Amino acid sequence: EGDAASVFLKATTRVSAGEELVVTYACEPAESFLLHMGFVGGMNPFDRVELWGSLAEAADWFAETFKSESGDVVLDKAAAREAAEELERQQRARERVAMVGLSSAGGATDDVSAELKLREMQNLMFGPSVGWKMDYDEALWMMFRHFTQALMPQEHADHIVMHAIKKRCEELLISMPTTIEEDEKIFSDENTPKRLKLAAEFRMYKKALLIRHLQSDA
């Protein structure tokens, strides 16, 4: 004890001789690991891809994407942005209440705590996003559903929302400067500089996540 160069780990359960010990760094997306720890971390179940910087940006995108047959914007952009900002306020309020309730409830599990902490952090880091758990931003879904019911009442709203999210995933994939095959080549090349290899690895996992949503039957 007292050795500043040492780290002591205290087991809270019985550990058998020869048993493998593993560690979870954090329940955070790849951006956090890359920014603060200098690595991507491989396949990360908590990773996400931001689709838009905010709900207001998503509202503008919806208005420009789902136009009339003559090419006119039919969704009132100002009203849509107001709706987006109100939904964001409501979402943050709900999650603040959940965090307060969690901190005062002694029976909450570590998994629930980690999940809520992750969602709070993602709200700070990301706008509306998609993740490996195939979950979708609740406020985004509600907003797109409302727009669909207003503009296309004859359509199945949830199908249109899913179509919109997949369309955005496709746009982001196309906008990236490299293909996933090019990134794999860069990553596997022994002569690739470390920073470039990290960038390629980061892009590969983001692209794989987007492709998963594109191929989803949901």
Image (tube, helix red, strand yellow):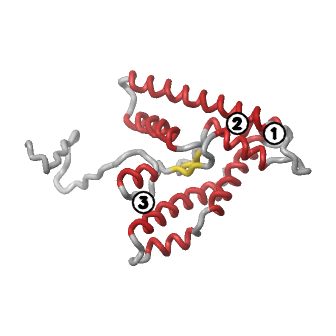
Residue at point 72%, 49% (across, down):
164
Task: Rate crowding at label 1 as few (under 14), some (14 to 19) or many (20 or more) other CA atoms within 10 Å.
Answer: many
Q: How many marks?
A: 3
Is 193 positioned to the left or the right of 22 in the image? Answer: right
Q: Quadrant of residue 92?
A: top right
Q: Disc 3 designates what residue?
A: 42
Q: For mark 3, does the 10 Å Cα neighbourhood hold few (<14), some (14 to 19), or many (20 or more) residues?
A: few
Task: Identify which amino acid the numbered label 1 is placed on.
Answer: Leu
Circles 2 and 1: CB atoms closer than 8 Å? no
Percent across and percent down for residue 132 are: 53, 51
Residue 143: give its label: 2
**At 87% from the left edge and 47% from the top edge, which residue is drawn?**
72
- Asked which secondary structure carries label 1, the reply is loop
**Cα distance in 3D space between marks 2 and 1:** 12 Å
Q: Looking at the rendered structure, which numbered label has been put on residue 75?
A: 1
Q: Earlier in the sequence, mark 3 or mark 1?
A: 3
